[in-house]
Image (tube, rainbow, N blue to C red):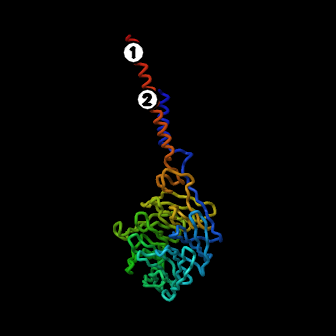
């Protein structure tokens, strides 16, 4: 009897205790570009299911399948930001040339000259608006003397409207918010002044929201899984902060909370929302990725492979986190499956890579052992009861 009790306990333990030989673990898989690059600084998901990205130093665009097969496209000048348009094309800025351009998923490139509209400014940020138009930021090259601009451009490449920002704050990155407005970063012309995050409606009405403490401005933005705007505030590149700005969907629009990022991490280029409900940040100078929950609490840090520097980040069509690196692209893979279908389930990780809860296979085996032991124990008890009953009958005769 004691033997069966022991087996029953063993089965229950097997069911609830993590199985070390089936832990899911992180690995970062690198996909170098055919042309050696100084860094991939902007990425977008295409309607064709591929990752599109910029290679500014090489005057190229790249396209990668989710298996890492990369194709490159030569450009007339250096690209800056890139975005997927609602028209099915990939749109990007050619800042030095004062142009924007689009590339079809078949690789046909069309450029549009905006120098007549932006003058001494350069094109920088780009995104597709909820109105179907392309929205572009044009910071002034004469910082402190002339205001920046935001342009609304139709998919034929014609600037429909232009809107000025203030002289003291130049626009940078821009994204389409979850509530249908456009949100953009603002870079101060001088240090020691109040920094802002900007919002513009598709009709051109602008609002500026102050962000906590002083710094060098905000650099990149993403929409969080909580439908708020998340951004990175730079402070001389040494003490960056992660910012969460409330949208009208969640309360008082513009309320912003700052969370500290590691000092000297040069978190400047990369931020994205993961399918796990968390915010991922590239800690460029430290060669790491960091994952934060919606309360700004650090969930995990992940080391990049030796020699790889992380820059930009995006959630790919495969729901994996893709990384623009100093050598091309990379993505986070789980080397072994876990019970969750989410590749980066918070319940299956800690701050030292990932240590998941017991996999489903372990639980199933544990249940089988426990049930088998229980049935065997019941059979033994029944058999002993029959023997005992037989002995009693014999004694009465």
Relative to the observer, which residue lies in front, 218 or 383? 383
First in sequence, mark 2 or 1: give its number. 2
Most distant residue in the left direction: 251
Mark 1 falls on what kind of element? helix
Depicted 99 relative to depicted 48: above or below: below
Depicted 384 relative to depicted 336: above or below: above
Mark 2 falls on what kind of element? helix
Q: Which residue is mark 2?
A: 378
Mark 2, other Cα within 10 Å: few <14 / some 14–19 / many ≥20: some
On the image, the x and y values in percent for residue 97 come to 56, 84
What residue is at 40 percent from the left and 63 percent from the top? 226
Q: Quadrant of residue 381 in the image? A: top left
Q: Which residue is mark 1?
A: 392
Residue 365: image tag? none
Depicted 361 relative to depicted 134: above or below: above
Residues at marks 2 and 1 touching, judged by CB atoms closer than 8 Å? no
Depicted 386 relative to depicted 155: above or below: above
On the image, the x and y values in percent for residue 185 come to 46, 74
> Is the C terminus in the top left, top right, bottom left or bottom right quadrant?
top left
On the image, the x and y values in percent for residue 371 come to 45, 36
Relative to the observer, which residue lies in front, 210 or 59? 59
Relative to the observer, which residue lies in front, 323 or 257? 323
Q: Quadrant of residue 168 in the image? A: bottom left
Q: How many marks?
A: 2
On the image, the x and y values in percent for residue 47 come to 50, 70
Mark 1, other Cα within 10 Å: few <14 / some 14–19 / many ≥20: few
Question: Quick check: 46 left or right of 200?
Answer: right
Whole-angstrom CA distance, mark 2 to mark 1, is 21 Å
Most distant residue in the bottom direction: 116
Relative to the observer, which residue lies in front, 379 or 211? 379
């Amino acid at each position: 009897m004691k033997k069966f009790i022991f087996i029953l306990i063993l089965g229950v333990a097997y069911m609830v205790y993590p199985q070390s030989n089936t832990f899911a673990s992180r690995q970062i898989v690198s996909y170098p570009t055919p042309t050696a690059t100084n860094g991939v600084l902007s990425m977008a998901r295409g309607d064709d299911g591929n990752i599109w990205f910029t290679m500014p130093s090489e005057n190229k665009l790249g396209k990668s399948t989710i298996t890492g097969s990369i194709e490159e496209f030569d450009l007339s000048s250096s690209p800056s930001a890139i975005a997927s348009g609602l028209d099915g094309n990939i749109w990007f800025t050619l800042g030095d040339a004062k142009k924007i351009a689009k590339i079809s998923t078949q690789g046909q490139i069309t450029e549009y000259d905006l120098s007549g509209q932006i003058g001494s400014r350069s094109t920088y940020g780009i995104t597709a608006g909820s109105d179907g138009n392309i929205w572009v930021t044009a910071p002034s090259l004469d910082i402190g003397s002339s205001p920046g601009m935001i342009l609304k451009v139709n998919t034929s490449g014609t600037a429909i409207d232009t809107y000025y920002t203030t002289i003291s704050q130049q626009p940078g990155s821009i994204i389409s918010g979850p509530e249908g407005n456009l949100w953009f970063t603002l870079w101060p012309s001088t240090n020691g002044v109040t920094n802002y995050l900007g919002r513009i409606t598709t009709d051109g009405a602008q609002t500026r929201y102050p962000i906590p403490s002083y710094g060098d401005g905000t650099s990149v933005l993403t929409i969080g899984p909580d439908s708020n705007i998340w951004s990175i505030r730079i402070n001389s590149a040494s003490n960056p902060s992660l910012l969460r700005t409330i949208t009208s969907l969640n309360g008082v629009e513009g309320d912003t909370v700052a969370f500290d990022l590691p000092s000297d991490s040069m978190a400047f280029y990369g931020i994205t929302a993961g399918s796990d409900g968390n915010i991922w940040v590239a800690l460029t100078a430290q060669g790491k990725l960091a994952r934060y929950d919606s309360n700004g609490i650090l969930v995990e840090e992940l080391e990049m492979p030796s020699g790889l520097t992380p820059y930009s980040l995006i959630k790919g069509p495969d729901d994996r986190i893709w990384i623009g690196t100093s050598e091309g692209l990379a993505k986070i893979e789980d080397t072994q499956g876990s019970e969750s279908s989410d590749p980066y389930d918070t319940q299956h990780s800690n701050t030292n890579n990932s240590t998941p809860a017991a996999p489903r296979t372990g639980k199933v085996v544990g249940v089988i052992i426990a049930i088998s032991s229980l049935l065997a124990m019941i059979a033994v008890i029944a058999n002993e009861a029959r023997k005992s009953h037989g002995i009693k009958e014999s004694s009465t005769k």
